[in-house]
Image (cartoon, helix red, strand yellow):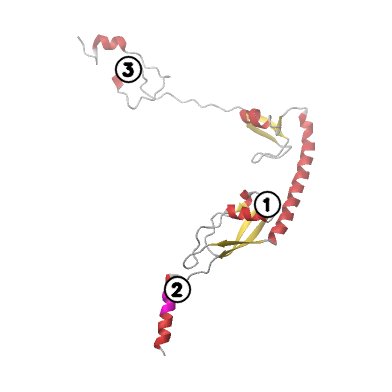
Amino acid sequence: MPGPGGGSAARRFRRRPNPAAPGKYFVDTPSRLRDLVGFPHSYPSTFTTTMAHTEVLLVKPVDGLGGEGDQVRVRAGYARNFLLPSGMALPVTHANSKQIEALKKRRAGREALELSGAQEVAQKLEKTSLAFAVTTGEGGKMFGSVTVGDLHDKLVAAGFSIDRKRIQLHTPVKTLGRHTVKVKLHADVAVDLAFDVVSENPIEPSAEEKAAEDKKNRKGESRR
């Protein structure tokens, strides 16, 4: 009687590979076993799916998309599930196209108000100086650092309402002294904010400084 690997029994159970069947077992499955259970001999071709899009009329500003009065093309699901239910956009139709001029006028007024407000805040920031008292060790080395969060907390305490994302401190400050950070208040308004980092305890000299001072003292004594 023929063995399990060939003969009439194997031919009776052998199936023709289905090219549309999943090929996830292709790598680990021997060829004869793929024939027996009907796994394909190659990976099936992939199909690309085109996402449906639609045009909407923005009635409120949307970050990264546009401002009121803009007609933008977005994914249909994004429009259906977020923009339209939230009242941020309307479907583009002949009827509401008449609203575009009114929306653009409203947008111009909003942008002018935002610019004026940013300029006012910038003038106040230019006259503001912040100070951070930190704990230091030998040689004035800081324990910790001054971060965006620290700067934001100081500004809030000083009466400023500024989004922390507008504070452009790319690297935490880890040294004593005078520093500046750029605060981007508006697309057309930015200001350099000055702040000082000082030690809250007396600064201990470093080992190198102590050695240099001892050497200097020994030279002075030898000259006497």
Task: Report the residue at 67% width, 35% height from top.
Answer: 72
Q: Residue furthest front?
A: 201
Q: Nearer the viewer, mark 1 or mark 3?
A: 1
Q: What is the quadrant of the N terminus in the image? A: top left
Residue 161 horizontal/vertical position (percent): 68, 50
Q: Is residue 9 visible?
A: yes
Q: x%, y% of residue 3? A: 21, 13
Alpha-carbon neighbours of circle 2 within 10 Å: few (<14), some, or many (≥20)? Answer: few
Mark 1 or mark 3: whose residue is earlier in sequence: 3
Foreground of the two, 81 or 222: 222
Q: Which residue is mark 1?
A: 185
Q: In the drawing, what numbered circle is on residue 209?
A: 2
- On the picture, is 139 further left or further right than 88? left
Residue type beneath disc 3: Asp
> Residue tagged by mark 3?
35
Depicted 128 relative to depicted 99: above or below: below
Report the disc number at residue 207.
none
Secondary element at tag 2? helix
Give percent across and percent down for residue 36: 31, 16
Q: How many residues crowd mark 3 within 10 Å: few (<14), some (14–19), many (20+)? A: many
Q: Residues within 10 Å of mark 1 (few under 14, many from 20)?
A: many
- Whole-Å distance between the Cαs marked 2 and 3? 80 Å
Closer to us: 209 or 87: 209
